[in-house]
Image: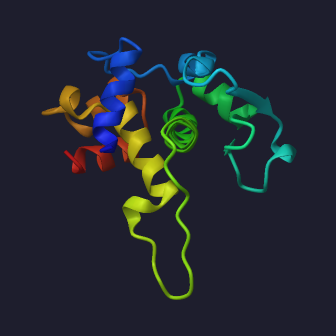
Amino acid sequence: MELRRLAKKIREMLDLTNELYFPIVEVLEILHKFDEDAHFEIVEADELEENEHAVTDIISKTIKIRSDVYEGACNGVGRDRMTIAHEFAHFITLCVCGFRLARSFGDVDVPPYCDPEWQAKCLAGELMIDSDLVKGMSRSEVSEKCGVSYDAAKLQLSKI
């Protein structure tokens, strides 16, 4: 399924079709609606790998979020909101939609569209910044109205 279309389906399911601001923290609270076994945990930095802000465990269907990242997202920090959206996107693509993890053997490169990181980055961007709603907006407007970083707004606008 095309990731932009998947994002629109998720927004539709959550009754957020015409909302610029995607409430990612609130969506975490209803993660079980996507899969009854799914949940999220707020953890301390020492419970994750060094430099990890959040991680999705596809076996236990758990999104683990560093406490400072969660607090930042709750306070509207765009980078932290996007970090959580990225992990939510991993959860959706791998646990709900059943996308397969890509593997590379030898010198064979994995096409970007088959790479779970690429998929999560794209889906998160589409969820947080709906392409139809931001057409004609400046980067600053997108950043402010969608609650994302300026860099995320710039990247997503370049894909429209």
Residue name at image x 33 percent, y 43 percent: 1
The relative height of residue 126 versus residue 15 in the rendered view (above or below) is below
- Relative to 147, 63 lies left or right: right
Outermost residue toward the right in this view: 46
Residue name at image x 35 percent, y 32 percent: 7
Q: Position of residue 97 (x, y in %)?
A: 48, 39
Q: Quadrant of the C terminus?
A: top left
Outermost residue toward the top in this view: 15
Q: Which quarter of the figure has residue 5?
A: top left
Q: Which is more toward the observer, 14 or 25?
A: 14
Q: Position of residue 15 (x, y in %)?
A: 36, 11
Colour pattern? rainbow
Q: Position of residue 156 (x, y in %)?
A: 30, 45
Looking at the image, can residue 75 be seen? no
Residue name at image x 55 percent, y 23 percent: 34
Q: Which quarter of the figure has residue 80?
A: top right
User: How many labels, in total?
Assistant: 0
Q: Which is more toward the observer, 86 or 140?
A: 86
The relative height of residue 150 versus residue 104 in the rendered view (above or below) is above
The relative height of residue 136 versus residue 21 in the rendered view (above or below) is below
Residue name at image x 35 percent, y 35 percent: 6
Outermost residue toward the left in this view: 136
- Relative to 60, 44 lies left or right: right
Looking at the image, can residue 77 be seen? yes
- Relative to 97, 31 lies left or right: right
- Relative to 84, 157 lies left or right: left
Q: Which is more toward the observer, 52 or 68?
A: 52
Q: Position of residue 63 (x, y in %)?
A: 68, 35
